[in-house]
Amino acid sequence: MTHQIDPSLNRRKLRLTLRRAREQAGLSQREAAERVEWSQSKLIRVENGTVGVSVSDLRALLALYDVTDPGQVEELEQAARGSKGPSWWSGFHEVVTPQFAQYLGYEGAADSLHTYHPIVVPGHLQTRAYAEALLAPRDLEEDRCRRVVDLRMERKQRMFDDSGRPACEFVLDEAAVRRQIGGKEVLGQQLGHLLELARRPQVSIRVLPFEAGAHYSTLGSFVLLGFPDDDDLLYLEHAAGSMTGGEDLRLLARYQECFRTITDKALDESQSADLISRVQQDLGVG
């Protein structure tokens, strides 16, 4: 049912299909926009997946691109009807930047996620107590802090909803496993949560040990999203966040190679679980 699909996923389906259909029709964005009497910026927003598409607008584009297969037309019309409306994170608008909202849309459509974090446990894997302790030094207002943590918890729940998608591979630096965010009790619970998540079939959690030495991504954390029907995407995590995909293939390839290097140096899943367990036991908590 279309209403069960997040609007961002419907917008993505339309974005990919309409862009390819335009290219197959041999039209530039400017030419296509002029033919249907749109502004070019409107077509760009549609092809970027940042706005929904009405059924009437969709039909105009499909006619221009000579897309006539009844089954495909019906599927796209259903996507158009489901492309409007709020995404699940819209309720957190006060703590979600436009850039991060765009990223969340991509993350929800990805069939694989690979990420490395050199300092702390990444947000995808955090317990509520750990997230709260991590945010405490930022001196956020209590309500804002709570909303950021709520967002993080809902994102995690959706990612690990037993659907088997996406397949996730997390590499944590040993420093992230040992840093006592929130004290021994909070870290102990967090490490136990990592061990629980690592038992899920679609989740791989590995530790890059101190002995691995220097490597390219001592510079910072990053996420690689993989798609079966689109270019992979790189998200660099910093204050503003930044994404790159097909428009910067060299940078994307650089981080893909970086992740392969990191995984070559990391402990395997069993060894990683053993290290996490030992650190938890050393804390003297359950």
Image (cartoon, helix red, strand yellow):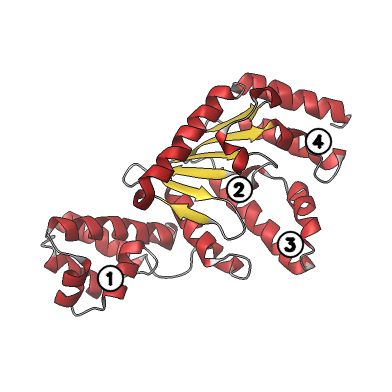
Distance from the alpha carbon under mark 3 to that under mark 4: 22 Å
State left or right for residue 269 relative to residue 179. Answer: left
Res. 240 mark: none
Distance from the alpha carbon under mark 4 to that under mark 2: 19 Å
Which of the 4 quarters of the picture holds residue 49? Answer: bottom left
Residue shown at the point (58%, 51%) measured from the top left: 237
* Residue reaching furthest to the right: 284
Rendered location of residue 280, percent (x, y): 80, 29
Tag 4 near tag 2, CB within 8 Å: no
> Is residue 193 positioned above or below 241 on the image?
above
Q: Earlier in the sequence, mark 2 or mark 3?
A: 3
**The C terminus sits in image quarter:** top right
Tag 3 near tag 4, CB within 8 Å: no
Residue 127 in view of the camera:
yes
Distance from the alpha carbon under mark 1 to that under mark 4: 51 Å
Residue shown at the point (62%, 58%) measured from the top left: 239
Tag 1 near tag 2, CB within 8 Å: no
Tag 1 near tag 4, CB within 8 Å: no
| Viewer-closest of 236 and 5 | 236
Residue shown at the point (62%, 38%) measured from the top left: 218
Distance from the alpha carbon under mark 1 to that under mark 2: 33 Å
Identify residue for label 3: 146
Identify residue for label 4: 188
Res. 43 mark: 1
Mark 3 neighbour class, 10 Å CA radius: few under 14, some 14 to 19, many 20 or more: some
Q: Earlier in the sequence, mark 4 or mark 2?
A: 2
Give, as a three-letter code, the residue at label 1.
Leu
Q: Earlier in the sequence, mark 1 or mark 2?
A: 1
Distance from the alpha carbon under mark 1 to that under mark 3: 38 Å
Q: Secondary structure at mark 1?
A: helix
Q: How many marks?
A: 4
| Viewer-closest of 227 and 189 | 227
